[in-house]
Image (spheres, grey):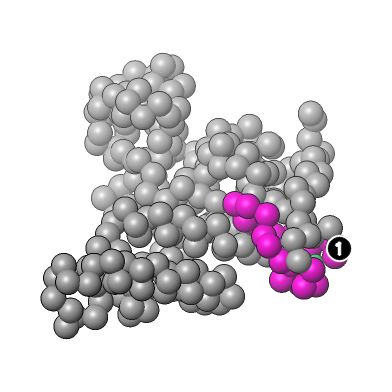
Amino acid sequence: MVGTNGGTPAGAAVTTEADDQEQSLAEILERLRREPALRSWVLGAPTGALASLGITLDDHEISALLDQVEEMDHRPLPVTAQDIMSTEPITVTPQTTIHEAAELLAEHRISGLPVCDYRDALVGVLSEYDLIARSGKTVGDIMSRDVVSVPTSATLETVRALFVSRRLKRVPVVGEDGRLAGLISRADLVRELAYRWACTRCGYVVRAKRAPEGCPKCGSARPFEAAQPEPAVSACPTCGRPLEH
Ligand SMILES: [Zn+2]
């Protein structure tokens, strides 16, 4: 940890500096609780943002602080594909050998991968099934080219209905620039169920890791409880045809 008041000789006022920093950390956490814009600034570029607030932390301390800040962050529903996707998923190219692709699936214990060309555009999906059922030398020989993907702006409801109607295990998320932006798995959707909280007074539903301390809508303190589950997906999101369960 490095002090921010540059004039102090190293070692001379270590305890005081640490105390000062602890004090200002508590104040900053309190400010972050009240100011969502400040929160997203710190979450976006933590090192620079914290330095300009007078806080210098090492990597470990920054990641611990970010966890705390993230827990404060809650947003109104609906959430979009952008909010729930894993960013920077593992990908392969059509030129990747089948052996290499099989190694990646086994090593990372995943059942499928997006296939991207050299410009990061999504060109296919490779699943365990493709590896077992088809033969070839490269991913391009055996991948499925008929890929279901969603834009970053797709709502959670649309994504969920798509998983159900097409019995998907994962869906790639494509950005406005046409590049692969992320990947949504069934596990990502399950996690969303744990992140939903409803205000017991006004019914306002938010997405957050932990129950928020106060309702941003009605002002009630500590009123949140686990939200009611969403109604079952009953129709195909594209054709509207009723689904069987
Ligand atoms: Zn409320």
Q: Main secondary structure of the magenta part?
A: loop
Q: With 187 as the anchor, is 177 left or right in this view?
A: left
Residue at 39%, 67% (x, y): give it.
22
Q: Is mark 1 within 8 Å of ligand 1?
A: yes
Q: Position of residue 138 (x, y in %)?
A: 27, 28
Q: Read off the magenta span.
A: 202-220
Q: Look at the image and tell me whether residue 153 can be seen.
A: no
* Residue sitting farthest toward the left: 9
Q: With 133 as the anchor, is 13 left or right in this view?
A: left
Residue in the foreground of this view, choosing between 82 and 191: 191
Q: How many marks?
A: 1
Which secondary structure lies at badge 1? loop
Q: Position of residue 240 (x, y in %)?
A: 78, 46
Relative to residue 156, is residue 75 depicted above or below? below
Q: With 88 as the anchor, is 174 left or right in this view?
A: right
Residue in the foreground of this view, choosing between 227 and 239: 227
Q: With 240 as the anchor, is 109 left or right in this view?
A: left
* Residue sitting farthest toward the bottom: 7
